[in-house]
Image (tube, rainbow, N blue to C red):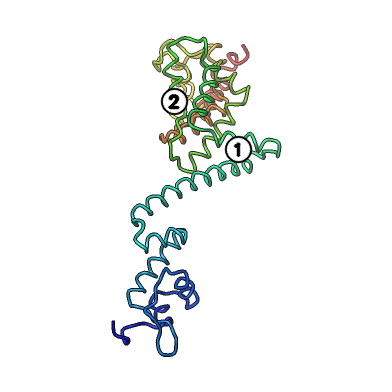
Amino acid sequence: MEDDELLSIGELARRAKLSVKAVRYYSDLGLVPTNGRDSAGRRRYSPDAAKRLGLIRALRALGVGLRTIRAVVGREAELGDVAAREAEAIGETIKVLQLRRAVLLAVARDGVGWEEVEMVHELAAMSARERRKFVGEFLDEVFGGLDARLAGIKRTLTPELADEPAPEQVDAWVALAELTQDPEFRTTLRDLAAAQPRTQRPTKDVIAKVAGVNPETDPTGPDGAEALHRINPTAADLARINQAKDPRRDDYLRLLAAINGWAAPTPLTPALEWFERATRHHSPNLLAK
């Protein structure tokens, strides 16, 4: 190559969009070989050195280490293989960061004290097998010993966190796992499961009837009275509705949907509150029983 085709370190730095100091550093490491020196002893480089420096600059920006870059530019490693390994490593880092974020959000959201931070961290860090065992114990306590027909409901209440969950799914898992540890909530769900009617038809299930009411209906007006008449609740129905009105039930279903990637469910609490207002207005004697 003719001398007039070679680049000075300053010209190379300009073409590579790097500082002269950075070019000298990479050159000293042997990542960018020189094409000799001029009469004044200054380094000279081939124009191809700018392309190599562009690759080095891009790989460094992507977090690739100098040892790996040396292997790539030295043809000791395939760029595609290196990219795949780096992407996998970044994926693992993302999982760790998501875990940390979920724990910190849980601590901030729930006002967790210092003595509870370890528990929240352990919930977030569970493996897939540990999560299944953890949730299985919760659902066994809720449905254990009850009618086998509830097995289908049990399955629909089982969270399945993806292998590569989104940050909001990790957050939802931590919140749901905490919720399952609430003994009052466990008791509420078990009581609801035990009172589940033998048929899931809306004509038999009072909660399904209430959920089917138009929320725009005035609970204290004549339309509300007619809707309440169609529901025709008994004192036992009122007890079941009071159990179902626990907002933690809606929280569980909302978090479950977020974890499993389902559409957000319609909360039941507003419908149950509508029912309570309608009953209080039109059938106060029923509430007194």
* Residue 247 against residue 78 in the figure, above or below: above
**Residue 174 marker:** none
Q: Is residue 260 visible?
A: yes
Q: Position of residue 187 (x, y in %)?
A: 60, 18
Q: Position of residue 43 (x, y in %)?
A: 42, 82
Q: Position of residue 70 (x, y in %)?
A: 42, 62
Of 56 and 186, nearer the camera is 56
Of 229 and 150, nearer the camera is 150
**Residue 121 marker:** 1
* Residue 170 against residue 83 in the figure, above or below: above
Position of the N terminus by quadrant:
bottom left
Residue drawn at the location 51% of the way across and 22% of the way down:
136
**Which residue matches tag 2?**
213
Q: Is residue 226 visible?
A: no
Specify which label sits upstream in the sequence, 2 or 1: 1
Residue drawn at the location 43% of the way across and 37% of the way down:
163
Q: Position of residue 37 (x, y in %)?
A: 40, 84
